[in-house]
Image (cartoon, helix red, strand yellow):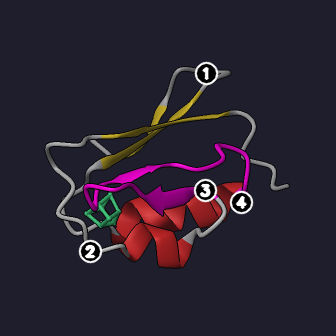
Amino acid sequence: MGDADKLKITIDREGCIGDGACCNDAPETFEMDDDDIAVLKDPVGDDRDTVLEAAQNCPTDAIKVEDTATGEVLYPEG
Ligand code: SF4
């Protein structure tokens, strides 16, 4: 289990193009569903940096990551 327990991770199903990149970057956090759309497998499966890296590498910025303690949107920025 990672240390991503303070993160709220949201996946935009409309934005996901199903390339599976997030599942490669953070395989304990994301998985593909039967429609080839990414879903949360375990929100605390990987560490925080790994989740953020996966969000940054998503080609469509379909993954939103918020800090539940501060409410800050960590990704996408700005
Ligand atoms: S990286 Fe983004 S587009 Fe690719 S499967 Fe994950 S959520 Fe979907």
Q: Earlier in the sequence, mark 3 or mark 1?
A: 3
Dot 2: few (<14), some (14–19), or many (≥20) neighbours within 10 Å? some
Front-most of residues 76 and 33: 33
Which of disc 1 and disc 2 is earlier in sequence? 2
Q: Is residue 55 above or below residue 13?
A: below
- Rounded to the nearest angstrom, the CA distance separating label 3 from label 2 is 15 Å
State the residue position of label 2. Answer: 19
- Marking on residue 78: none
- Write the start and end of the magenta stretch as one range: 29-47
Which numbered disc covers residue 70?
1
Residue 29: image tag = 3
Mark 4–mark 2 CB contact (< 8 Å): no
Q: Mark 3 or mark 1, which is nearer to you?
A: 3
The local secondary structure at tag 4 comes to loop
Check disc 1: other Cα within 10 Å, few if <14, some if 14-19, many if 20+: few
Q: CA distance from mark 4 to mark 1?
A: 20 Å
Q: Is residue 41 left or right of residue 69?
A: left
Residue 34 falls in image quadrant:
bottom left
Please tell me whether mark 2 sits on a helix, a strand or a loop: loop
Magenta stretch: includes residue 40: yes
Q: Which residue is mark 4?
A: 46
Residue type marked 4: Asp
Name above or below for residue 25 compared with residue 43.
below
Q: Secondary structure at mark 1?
A: loop
Q: CA distance from mark 4 to mark 3?
A: 6 Å
- Secondary structure mostly seen in magenta is loop
Residue 62 lies left or right of residue 7; in this view the side is: left
Task: Tell me the CA gap for discs 3 and 1.
Answer: 21 Å
Residue 3 in the image, given as x and y percentages of width and height? 81, 49
Q: Residues within 10 Å of mark 3 (few under 14, many from 20)?
A: many
Cβ of mark 2 under 8 A from ligand 1:
yes
Judged by depth in the image, the label closer to the viewer, 4 or 1, is 4
